[in-house]
Image: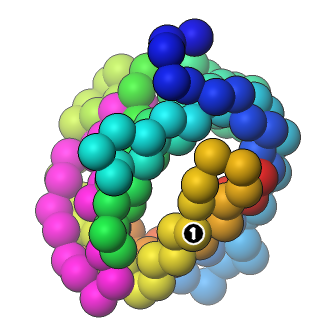
Amino acid sequence: MAVGQKEINICVTSEQRLSGDEPSKYELYTVAKYSEKNGTKYISYDESEMFGFASSVMLIITDGTVKVRRYGENQTVLFLKEKHRCNTTYKTPYVAFDIEIMTEKVIANVCEDYGNIELIYTVAIDGSEANHSLKIRY
């Protein structure tokens, strides 16, 4: 573990709902690493157990924004800020495709000892939309 990093026990709850379908919900309890530098907070964790393929996530938290970087077999960077739209690329081992992210809600109250993150956003791919929520607590 790098200098200045602290291990934290987190609960990650992820929910996805495609138009007209029942939601898919996942919950993961895992150890994450927390650090802070120049007012920016970082939380990183492995979510391989949640989805069944190699995947790590780093959350980069600054004033009212959360950047979600996913590494591993699937790679993407989501820039989430309330009422903000952004375009990005989602890369899988088989294909890369463009997605649009529309952020509805960003709550990121975190420090070294406790945290509450709630992200609600919609992902649009080729005319189809999926509603997502990601909650992290420690």
- Residue drawn at 64 percent across, 28 percent down: 6
When asked about the image quadrant of residue 71, the answer is: top left
Residue 126 visible, this angle? no
Which quadrant is home to the N terminus?
Answer: top right
Residue 92 screen position, x and y as percent: 35, 30
- Residue drawn at 52 percent across, 76 percent down: 107
Residue 22 screen position, x and y as percent: 74, 76
Per the image, label 1 sits on a secondary structure element best described as strand
Classify 24 as above or below 33: below
84 in magenta:
yes
Q: Which residue is mark 1?
A: 109
The span picked out in magenta is 73-90
Total tally of numbered discs in the picture:
1
Classify 26 as above or below 100: above
What secondary structure do most residues of the magenta stretch adopt? strand
When asked about the image quadrant of residue 99, the answer is: bottom left
- Residue drawn at 67 percent across, 77 percent down: 21
Residue 40 screen position, x and y as percent: 34, 49
